[in-house]
Image: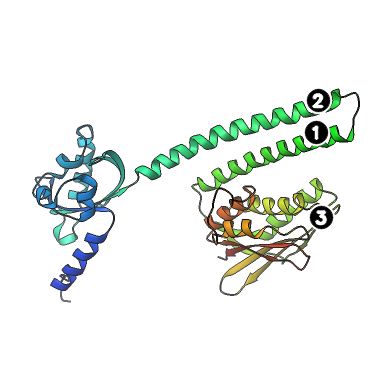
């Protein structure tokens, strides 16, 4: 058997490669390892803009001395050692830029097997804005949820006490107290949905094969018990496997709850159906006979309209369902039900 001769890039391939690297928005630097130390061979435009060095000035310089903070040089040397041995590095790192210290996703990629130990490429994706937003969102989420929940509980408790203290229970007083109580309950619901959204978006778990029929039956049984005036029907197969996880319960619970809670009828009607589709998909329908979800709210949730100060949806329930379903690789859509109200559809991949 003859040995395999590795392919070499032609001049045309080199031109294409250079064109690609030059127009990548991430900072890219090619380096040689001289006694284990990375020395700059070439950089792309994003590198010069991010780190503030002209390409000519950077070439031939020690990379770590250009961009690695003094206190992190030892960490950088460890990464260089891994590159020397042919290992690919992925790590969050901090680097000195033209605008100060910033956080990056660093990927160190050594040359191919025939040149291991000679050098490679470093790619820096700026994560500073993403990381800052993540941290700010966590703080806001925790503080707001904690305070909203506590304040809502206080409002409910004190409204009940005030109403009991009135000597005369007039219709106006009763109506006012009921309005305040509903608003407080809505706040409690909002904090619960925000907490669940946070858990869904930050969950490390992936999807698995889930029989959605027992999940649907469990959700329906809960709402039949909690809302005895509602008529909750099902039309389900014996079983139906989909790609999901435990958060499917929460998404379905939110849809059934919305269908009941936002229906002013004395006897709200809800129907939950599920069926397999062709080409590896399944759809779960949650239908009702209540008022239609406003088109503006549907369009914002589906992405057909932009969020604005006056157009953002009335709550978090549909956002919770949308983002949960999207973590499964599915989608959320809306249509009109033959019950006269909404048909909210969850489309999920099948295993």
Q: Secondary structure at mark 1?
A: helix
350 left or right of 275 in image: left
Asked whether the residues under the numbered discs 1 and 2 touch, taking CB atoms below 8 Å apart as contact, a structural biologist would say yes
Farthest residue, direction bottom = 1
The part of the image, by quadrant, that contains residue 217 is bottom right
- According to the picture, the residue beneath numbered tag 2 turns out to be 162
Q: Residue 292: percent from the left, percent from the top?
A: 72, 59
Could you tell me which residue is drawn at 14 percent across and 58 percent down? 115
246 left or right of 260 in image: left
Cα distance between the residues tagged 1 and 3: 24 Å
| 165 vs 105, nearest the viewer | 165
The part of the image, by quadrant, that contains residue 97 is top left
| Label 1 CA crowd tier, 10 Å (few <14, some 14–19, many 20+) | some
- According to the picture, the residue beneath numbered tag 3 turns out to be 268
- According to the picture, the residue beneath numbered tag 1 turns out to be 177
Could you tell me which residue is drawn at 64 percent across and 70 percent down? 276
């Amino acid at each position: 058997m003859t040995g395999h001769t590795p392919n070499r890039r032609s001049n045309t391939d080199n031109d294409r490669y250079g064109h690609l690297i030059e127009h990548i928005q991430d900072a890219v630097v090619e380096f040689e390892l001289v006694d284990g130390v990375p020395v700059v061979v070439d950089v792309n435009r994003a590198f010069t803009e991010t780190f503030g060095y002209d390409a000519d000035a950077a070439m031939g310089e020690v990379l770590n001395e250009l961009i690695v903070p003094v206190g992190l040089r030892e960490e950088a040397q460890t990464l260089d050692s891994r590159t020397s041995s042919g290992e690919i590095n992925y790590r969050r790192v901090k680097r000195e830029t033209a605008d100060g210290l910033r956080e990056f996703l660093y990927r160190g990629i050594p040359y191919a097997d025939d040149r291991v130990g000679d050098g490679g490429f470093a790619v820096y994706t700026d994560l500073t804005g993403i990381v800052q937003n993540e941290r700010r969102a966590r703080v806001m989420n925790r503080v707001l949820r904690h305070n909203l929940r506590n304040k809502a509980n206080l409002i409910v408790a004190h409204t009940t006490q005030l109403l009991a203290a009135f000597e005369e229970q007039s219709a106006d007083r009763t109506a006012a107290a009921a309005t305040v109580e509903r608003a407080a309950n809505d706040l409690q619901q909002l904090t619960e949905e925000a907490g669940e959204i946070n858990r869904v978006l930050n969950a490390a778990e992936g999807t698995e094969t889930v029989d959605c029929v027992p999940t649907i039956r469990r959700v329906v049984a809960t709402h039949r018990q909690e809302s005895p005036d509602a008529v909750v029907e099902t039309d389900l197969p014996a079983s139906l496997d989909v790609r999901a996880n435990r958060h499917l319960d929460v998404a379905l619970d939110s849809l059934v709850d919305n269908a009941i809670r936002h229906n002013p009828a004395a006897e709200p009607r809800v129907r939950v159906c599920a069926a397999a589709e062709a080409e590896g998909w399944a759809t779960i329908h949650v239908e009702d006979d209540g008022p239609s979800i406003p088109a503006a709210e549907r369009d914002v949730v589906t992405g057909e309209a932009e969020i604005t100060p006056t157009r953002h949806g009335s709550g978090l329930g549909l956002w919770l369902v949308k983002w949960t379903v999207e973590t499964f690789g599915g989608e959320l859509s809306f249509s009109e039900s033959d019950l006269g109200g909404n048909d909210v559809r969850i489309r999920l991949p099948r295993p």
